[in-house]
Amino acid sequence: MLRRLAALSLSSKTTRLMEDEVKLTVEAAMDDALARGGMDVIAHMAHNVPSRKVCKIMGIPECDRERFNEWTASRTNAFFARFLPPEIQQRTREARHALLEFAERTKGLRIERGALEWLHSFFRVMASLPLSCHQTRDSQQHKSCGSRGRPQFAARHAPTLYFTPRFIHAVARVRAGGANHPPVSPNSPRRPPVKLALYLPNFRDQVTVKELEDLTELAEALDFDSVWTLDRIVVPEASDHQKLQHSFGMMDQFPKALPVSARGQWLHGMPLIPWLAAKTKKLRIGMSIIDTPYRAPGVLAGEIATVDHLSNGRVNVGVGSGWMPEEFAAASAAHIFPKRHKHVRETIEVLQGIWTNEVFEYHGEFADFEPCGFGAKPLQMPYPPIYFSGLKDPKRSAKRISKYNLSGWIGIQDTPEEIVRWRGEISRELAELGSTRSLDDGFDMCSMIWFAITDEPTDQTPNGKLSNLLVGTAAQITDNLKRYRDAGMDMPLLWPPFSGVPVSKTLDDMKRLVEEIMPKVNA
């Protein structure tokens, strides 16, 4: 039966006939899986239908195997959802809860995204399963073909399954030792625990390396998910007089000025990334966000890949377009400002192309080069998670997320209501684009939010981007984090204020947050 399922997934029959047969076979496979405890049959499948054999049967070159796996993983969700009737979904509860329990107990592991997406599709796992983990490459050299233009995989290939035996065996091991963990209630919808990230205050009038080191060390000791730096190239003197061309971030409520003076002694974000790689062992590291017009896409791709090696596969990549014409001019990129969003698109294409091809060429408006090798590939497969910064246009964000299979979205000072709105609008745009992508499947909704615990209650009156969201008493912050959790926020980037709060206070606040507040939020 298992071999028949594999053969069906590679069949050249018409779509209708294939779907009819797959429906029956999947139902039989589900029955068999449940009867045998849920996991044995999956392990058997993993060994009988390796992706290398699938590609060989379908005539897919070895160099395209990884890209094919990624393509199929992104489509199995919708494929299997169409074939599992309600009675089969009901009978998969046991496996569903086992996977939820597994996800809870392995939050710190870097697991290959394709394996999680495949199991999510097959078992119809509820939306709370966190799928944002990444696994590093094997030591064996990654091999792939060169590609012309933007990387893509033709949709002519039939849907098939994505198998990762190592992940299956990990599931079996976790289940075998899971007797001491209470089962997940089948009737209690849950979201995964809120992750914590620290937005380092490298952009301040005065900040020292020692202060950033102390904050980073504590974040790692407290099991934060990640630390991020801020990308700033210049502070124009016009900002000191509130005479920038645009308000901060092009957001109406902010002045035409930056919160740091032109003579401030702040630290640049990009050089801090390899320093953070050397200073940490567990934390993921990134910059929120990299303004791509200030960097050559090919150079950026090679540098990020190298840092991924320095960090042993812990790099996150945040990308955005920038907003300040004065900064574009200082970065010798004034000509890009009118087309900055296109530059972001080309940068993502170049990053993904270089990271997944041994030799790569690209011919666009801002990057135009013949076939080249750019050195080592990232350790993370198929490449580090990419986050997109969006402040105004959900439609643009949805297009990027769908087209490039991005891993997350990062906003700024978003209220729980705005998180709900962004999630809803992005989801609707994804549906209109015909995408099978779900924001509940391996996607991080994030926002950079000012953070400080106060002794006295703060004014919680809604005031847009100026609201006191995570600035308040412990009780106020607890309530707001619960609202964020329920709204679908996966990870706030905790942002110490630009001034008025010393680093020593932030260190104390971080400890109180983890020890006093988060147990209540994630209860």
Image (cartoon, rainbow, N blue to C red):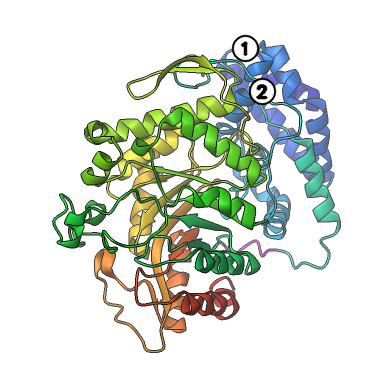
Q: Identify which amino acid the numbered label 1 is placed on.
A: Lys
Question: Crowdedness of circle 2 by 10 Å Cα count: few (<14), some, many (20+)?
Answer: some
Q: Main secondary structure of the magenta part?
A: loop
Q: Mark 2 or mark 1: which is in front?
A: 1
Label at residue 406 = none
* Residue holding disc 2: 21
* Residue holding disc 1: 13
Q: Identify which amino acid the numbered label 2 is placed on.
A: Glu
* Secondary structure state at the residue bearing disc 2: helix
The image position of residue 275, as x and y in percent, is 57, 52
Q: CA distance from mark 2 to mark 1?
A: 10 Å
Figure quadrant of the N terminus = top right
The image position of residue 186, as x and y in percent, is 65, 61
Figure quadrant of the C terminus = bottom right
Name the residue rendered at 60%, 17% in the picture: 17
Is 413 inside the magenta-drawn segment?
A: no
